[in-house]
Image: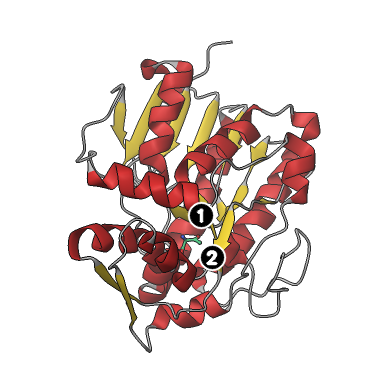
């Protein structure tokens, strides 16, 4: 069957690379990039683009009507740090955007829906190390609350209406092609840019703050592998834990110093993102993803650091 794929929120950190990967796999014209703004970068394998605000039901409906998508990826969201600056907007976009898409996916018989959750769905009373798939989840950011609620809605639509919705709890995502947009893990991208430009960086998270992270190539690979897995293998319909590599700012700084020996890493105190990071896991148990769809990341800290520096240098 010929696939037609909508990527909603295509201009963001994930969308930018996911659209390219999906166009390579399915053909440029089969993947419709949708966002509230035109992309300001040159898209490789350019294909169709639509202006879509996921909160505008008329436009969203018209887009489903026009393309009758077989797969939809909903990536439009406000992240953890930006969400705290505008909690009501974060709730509205993250929650109502999801419900609108789930409803149109049902109405237009979309075969598969992808929606990302996050490690932000965990909270201060979740186990910190090797955080399991099932445990106490008490997020204390609006973003985290919306992700946990969204997970419950995804499972609900699957159980009640048999909608094939799939999801991953992304850790911090590290990429060089598109900038991250307002998250707590963004330091791990900014550090590479500043290392190359200024040979120094001031981290807004403290030296010993360990967080789970994933290189973007692995995130895209995992996302497409999950979407390609046979439906009967998918045992988690809320959202899968996914691990890549866990590190602290200090460990990342030491790795960068292997390439740039004079790199200086300083720390900014009292940044509000520290409290958010403190409420999140340090590392993740992703055994369900390993068992259900053979998840295996390709990038460790050393390989990721080399790739980031080499690509940003170009
Ligand atoms: C954020 O920091 O808000 C995101 C996330 C972990 O979901 N990168």
Could you tell me if residue 175 is visible in this image?
no
Q: Which disc number belongs to residue 202?
A: none
Comparing 203 with 6, the one in front is 203
Residue at the image point whose x is 58% and y is 62% from the top: 246
Give the quarter of the image for residue 292.
Answer: top right
Q: Provide residue 227's location: percent of width, then percent of height.
A: 62, 32
Q: Provide residue 80's location: percent of width, then percent of height.
A: 45, 68
Q: Does residue 249 appear left or right of residue 291 in this picture?
A: left
Q: Does residue 137 appear left or right of residue 23 in this picture?
A: right
Residue at the image point whose x is 42% and y is 77% from the top: 205
Q: Distance between the residues labelled 1 and 2?
A: 8 Å
Q: Mark 2 points at which residue?
A: 247
Asked if 247 appears above or below 297 in the picture, the reply is below
Proximity of marks 1 and 2: CB atoms separated by less than 8 Å = yes
Residue at the image point whose x is 55% and y is 23% from the top: 70
Q: Does residue 231 appear left or right of residue 1 in this picture?
A: right
SS for callout 2: strand
Q: Name the residue under label 1.
A: 301
Comparing 252 with 225, the one in front is 252
Viewport quadrant of the N terminus: top right
SS for callout 1: helix
Q: Does the residue labelled 2 lie within 8 Å of ligand 1?
A: no
Viewport quadrant of the C terminus: top left
Residue at the image point whose x is 63% and y is 75% from the top: 123
Q: Which of marks 1 and 2 is nearer the N terminus?
A: 2
Q: Provide residue 137's location: percent of width, then percent of height.
A: 70, 71
Give the quarter of the image for residue 184.
Answer: bottom left
Q: Does the residue labelled 1 lie within 8 Å of ligand 1?
A: no
Q: Provide residue 2's location: percent of width, then percent of height.
A: 53, 12
Q: Does residue 96 appear left or right of residue 284 in this picture?
A: left
């Amino acid at each position: 069957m010929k696939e037609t794929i909508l990527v909603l929120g295509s201009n963001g950190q994930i969308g930018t690379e996911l659209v390219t990967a999906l166009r390579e796999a399915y053909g440029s014209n089969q993947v419709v990039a949708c966002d509230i703004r035109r992309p300001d970068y040159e898209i490789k394998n350019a294909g169709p683009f639509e202006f879509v605000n996921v909160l505008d039901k008329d436009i969203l409906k018209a887009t489903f009507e026009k393309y009758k998508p077989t797969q939809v990826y909903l990536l439009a969201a406000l992240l953890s740090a930006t969400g705290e600056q505008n909690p009501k907007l974060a709730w509205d976009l993250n929650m109502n955007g999801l419900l609108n898409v789930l409803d149109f996916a049902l109405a237009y018989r979309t075969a598969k829906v992808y929606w990302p959750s996050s490690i932000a769905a965990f909270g201060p009373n979740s186990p910190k190390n090797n955080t399991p798939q099932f445990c106490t989840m008490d997020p204390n950011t609006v973003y985290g609350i919306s992700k946990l609620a969204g997970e419950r809605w995804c499972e609900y639509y699957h159980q009640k209406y048999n909608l094939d919705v799939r999801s991953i709890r992304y850790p911090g995502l590290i990429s060089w092609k598109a900038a991250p947009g307002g998250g707590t893990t963004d330091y791990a991208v900014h550090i590479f840019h500043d290392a190359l430009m200024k040979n120094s960086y001031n981290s807004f998270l403290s030296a010993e703050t360990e967080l789970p992270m994933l290189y973007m190539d692995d995130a895209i690979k995992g996302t497409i592998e999950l979407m390609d897995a046979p439906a009967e293998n998918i045992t988690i319909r809320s959202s899968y834990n996914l691990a890549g590599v866990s590190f602290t700012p200090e460990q990342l700084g030491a790795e960068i110093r292997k390439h740039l020996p004079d790199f200086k890493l300083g720390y900014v105190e009292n940044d509000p993102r520290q409290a958010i990071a403190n409420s999140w896991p340090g590392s993740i148990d992703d055994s369900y993803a390993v068992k259900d769809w053979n998840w295996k990341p390709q990038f460790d800290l050393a390989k990721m650091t080399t790739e980031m520096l080499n690509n940003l240098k170009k």
